[in-house]
Image (cartoon, rainbow, N blue to C red):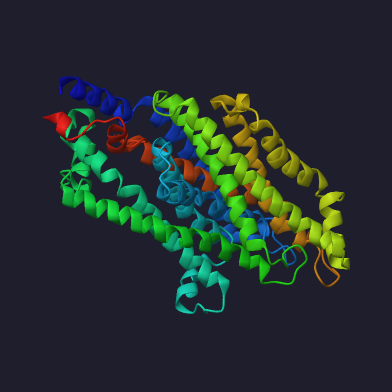
Amino acid sequence: MDNNKTTFEKLTLDLSHHIRINKGFLVWMGFLTVALCVCLYAYGLQLKQGLGVAGIRDYVSWGIYLSNFVFFVASSLIGMLISAVLGLIGVKWITPLVRIAETIAVAFAAVAGLVIISDMGRPERLAYVFIYGRVQSPILWDVTVVTTYLVLSILLLFLPMIADIAILRKKAQLLPAWLRPIYNVLSLNYADTPEQNRIIHRSIRTLSIILIPAALSIHTVTSWLFAFTTRPGWDSTIFGPYFVSGAFVAGCAAVIIAMYFFRSSYKLQDYIQDLHFDRMGKVLVLMCLIYLYFNINEYLVPAFKLKKADALHLHELFSGGEALMFWLVQLGGLVLPIILLIFSWFRRPLPMMLISIAVIVGAWFKRYLIVIPTQEHPFLPIQHVPANFMVYSPTLVESLITIAPFILVLMIITIISKFFPVIPIYETAKERGIEPFNSDK
């Protein structure tokens, strides 16, 4: 029992020593706050002067704001893949990664709704979506499923954390004084009784099952915002699975990047091991292969038919003005990562992190290519308009407003990971044969 207690004490200390406000945290949050204020100033200019200060015009009415929205919704789906799908089928190696994935899911889902507001010239009318929303509109469906997915993700983040909060509440010396009352409330009087565990485990399993259709719906409905039109490039019947598979690629890359920085910053090498990077690398390869299949379908079928409007769109992507970005995204953000990650050497922490950065940057620009080029080829000729209406290019104001949601996501992830254990204490102890609450006796 003494050895058991000593081991548990070390495990608890290892997984909670980062829960404090230090100089590094203050500097990082200060930098993010200043950057966010600059972006909010840009948004203030847009509110005052209208969407004309952005690169949005009559013809390209959806700019990088909508590219951002699609990207944020996509990245949030990783919570479903890790905690729901892999968790329900009993994969054990994901234990240190589940909370990281759910934290990312909560952060991206929470901010996704704000991204939509940035694209509204009259944001005070947002309430009209709920008051006058029509069931026939996928916009109403999108708002509904994003909100539902956010609530489910918050619950799946919090419920497994209750046991950890109760453990640290009993070890008050490990917590900052101001955080102890918060832990006392959030622990919900958890005492590791069989009845409490049964309720929590049943709730987690039920939420995980519900999360799967909710997550599939959130990005499928987002894809329908495009697919319900007849525009070339959007008029597709496979946009649902195409978007969902791309979402898993972006989400896996986000988790791998977070794994690397948490492991380095919080000294978690004993818990986030090379094995976990290797396994996540294999999952990323699988997701990239599925996404590559849908990419081939999405371009091969219209290329074979070669209707006039589709021909113009594909020419713009393959050899026109968007060709450089298109091939960099396809080759650098999808094909090359697949080839590299087949080899075990590249599935080590540092190479994995660098490859994942390339994947996630490519994923964002992929959303740009989905949203923008289609609108630059309207059905009717462009006549009697200024030259800048004919070609879209983001302005500085629009770019700053686009950066703001990324800053908010980093703030949310930083706060959650700084004030709560990044890796589950209770489940890690159980896996190592330690009874957490008995170890205190």
Q: Establish if 4 lies above or below 225.
A: above
Residue 361 percent location from the top left of the image: 64, 41
Residue 30 against residue 348 in the figure, above or below: below
In the displayed structure, does residue 307 sit left or right of residue 156? right
Residue drawn at point x = 11 percent, y = 30 percent:
441
Q: Is residue 439 left or right of residue 82?
A: left
Q: Quadrant of residue 234?
A: bottom right
Q: Position of residue 237 (x, y in %)?
A: 69, 67
Image quarter where the N terminus lies is top left
Q: Which image quarter: residue 424?
A: top left
Q: Looking at the image, which is closer to me, 75 or 129?
A: 75
- In the image, 221 versus 380, the foreground residue is 221
Residue 391 shows in this picture:
no
Q: Residue at x 38, y 37 (%)?
A: 417
Q: Position of residue 220 (x, y in %)?
A: 57, 63
Q: Do we see residue 14 in this rendering?
A: yes
